[in-house]
């Protein structure tokens, strides 16, 4: 076994950190509630910051409130970065986000106790509010919305107040933007939040990319009329039209080759009365895929079909784009590095698509990005039952550690510094 492969994380230390963090915001049912900017979030941030310092990292908080721990490298310049989030949904679990942050700290602990520095500095980042505004990673990518009202919370608190509480500063949000010359590559370890790895029995998910998303609002206008006295041929039934459109969305997603998913999960009917022909329907479409071209083609086909349905049903349609998020592909170089690591460590692996958003989606817009998934029991997350075993968490963290060691050479400006590192290890 090479010296590099002899390095491994301390699984019990990693898992006890995960358990300790889960005490903050602990729910009676075993889950965690640690919504961003609450006192639980603040306490958790403080604890994680102290762990970063103990691991030998310098810590700074940027204008977006992101906590950035940095372990210096042998040379100045771009860092290799990892991290995730420690905020949760109101009723969340122990692992979503937390695993990525604490594995990032564990990687540094291992390097430090072995007297090692990599060529690159390592940054472990806690991104602000991943579960709601996603402001931390967006600010780092330079993609925040200028209007602070956009970020006002449902309890009325302003983003200025929220960021000030965690050491950020809304007025300087533009300064949180990072560049490829500061972060050469970013790798996020995360629980899968889906059931693919559990069903295939594979140990590691090598993420190909994070899907892009379109959300459309569709309004179908017909003519409300008496359900008894309006003959069938004289109706302009908005619900009949909308129903055909819902089926058309489903058919398109099922029959088009590819891995796209399309959902109509919201629909309202006016006047929604048993004895009235529906006069108006509004529904929303959620469309996701890794290929932006495929998404655009699907949308074009969908619109054509909707128009045909509208004219056949004598209704009118109005389509509004509510959301558009571009997909982010994982850098092939990083995917290959993760695959090689899995082969070396004897971990079974599978390439898969992330259908949920992650901090890596934004970071991947300005620098090379990769993601490592480990299984979620039953595919469950954002729930108290979320569970990934200590062994799986440890395997994920070891994959992250080894991927960093590999990327350190791949992204090195010159030469193979690892030869020298081996010398250091042997001391
Ligand atoms: Zn997450």
Image (tube, rainbow, N blue to C red):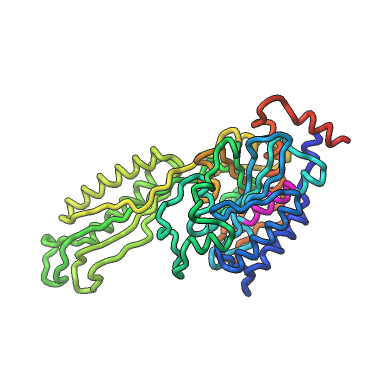
Q: Quadrant of residue 94?
A: bottom right
Q: Position of residue 303 (x, y in %)?
A: 27, 46
Instruction: Name, please, the residue furthest toward the top.
Output: 415
Residue 280 rendering spot, x and y as whole percentages: 22, 63
Q: Residue at x 59, y 58 (%)?
A: 167
Taking depth in this image into account, of 364 and 398 the one nearest to the observer is 364
Q: Which residue appears at 14% of the width and 68% of the height?
A: 225
Q: Is residue 94 visible?
A: yes
User: Where does the N terminus fall, quadrant-wise?
Assistant: top right
The residue lying toward the viewer, choosing from 38 and 265, is: 38
Residue drawn at x 82%, y 43% is 114
Which is more toward the observer, 6 or 422? 422
Give the number of callouts.
Answer: 0
Magenta highlight range: 98-108
Identify the residue at image location x=42%, y=49%: 261
Q: Is residue 83 above or below residue 179?
A: below
- Quarter of the rendering occupied by the C terminus: top right
Residue 32 in the image, given as x and y percentages of width and height? 61, 67
Answer above or below: position of 193 versus 226: above
């Amino acid at each position: 076994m090479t010296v590099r492969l002899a390095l491994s994380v301390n699984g019990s230390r990693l898992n006890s950190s995960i358990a300790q963090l889960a005490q903050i915001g602990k729910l009676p049912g075993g889950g965690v509630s640690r919504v961003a900017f609450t006192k639980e979030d603040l306490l958790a941030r403080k604890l994680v910051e102290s762990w970063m310092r103990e691991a030998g990292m310098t810590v700074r908080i940027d204008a977006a409130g992101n906590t950035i721990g940095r372990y210096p490298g042998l040379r100045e310049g771009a860092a290799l970065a990892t991290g995730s989030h420690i905020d949760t949904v109101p009723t969340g679990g122990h692992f979503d986000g937390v695993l990525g942050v604490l594995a990032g700290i564990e990687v540094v602990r291992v390097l430090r106790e072995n007297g090692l520095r990599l060529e690159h500095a390592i940054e472990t980042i806690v991104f602000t509010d991943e579960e709601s505004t996603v402001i931390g990673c967006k600010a780092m990518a330079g993609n925040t919305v200028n209007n602070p009202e956009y970020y006002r919370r449902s309890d009325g608190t302003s983003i200025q107040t929220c960021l000030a509480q965690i050491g950020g500063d809304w007025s300087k949000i533009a300064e949180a933007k990072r560049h490829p010359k500061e972060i050469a590559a970013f790798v996020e370890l995360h629980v899968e939040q889906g059931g693919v790895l559990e069903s295939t029995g594979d140990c590691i998910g090598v993420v190909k990319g994070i899907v892009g998303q379109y959300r459309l609002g569709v309004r179908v206008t017909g003519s409300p009329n008496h359900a008894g006295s309006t003959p069938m041929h004289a109706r302009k039934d908005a619900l009949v039209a909308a129903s055909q459109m819902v089926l058309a969305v489903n058919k398109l997603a099922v029959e088009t080759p590819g891995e796209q998913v399309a959902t109509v999960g919201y629909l309202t009917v006016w006047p929604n009365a048993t004895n009235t022909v529906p006069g108006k329907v509004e529904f929303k479409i959620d469309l996701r895929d890794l290929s932006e071209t495929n998404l655009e083609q699907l949308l074009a086909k969908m619109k054509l079909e909707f128009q045909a349905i509208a004219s056949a049903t004598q209704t009118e349609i109005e389509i509004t784009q509510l959301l558009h998020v571009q997909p982010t592909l994982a850098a092939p170089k990083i995917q290959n590095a993760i695959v090689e690591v899995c082969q070396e460590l004897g971990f079974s692996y599978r390439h898969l698509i992330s259908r949920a958003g992650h901090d890596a989606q934004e970071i991947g817009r300005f620098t090379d990005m990769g993601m490592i998934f480990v299984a979620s029991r039953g595919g469950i997350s954002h729930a108290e039952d979320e569970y990934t075993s200590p062994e799986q968490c440890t395997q994920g963290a070891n994959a992250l550690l080894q991927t960093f060691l590999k990327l350190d050479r791949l992204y090195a400006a010159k030469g193979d510094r690892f030869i020298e590192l081996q010398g250091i290890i042997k001391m």
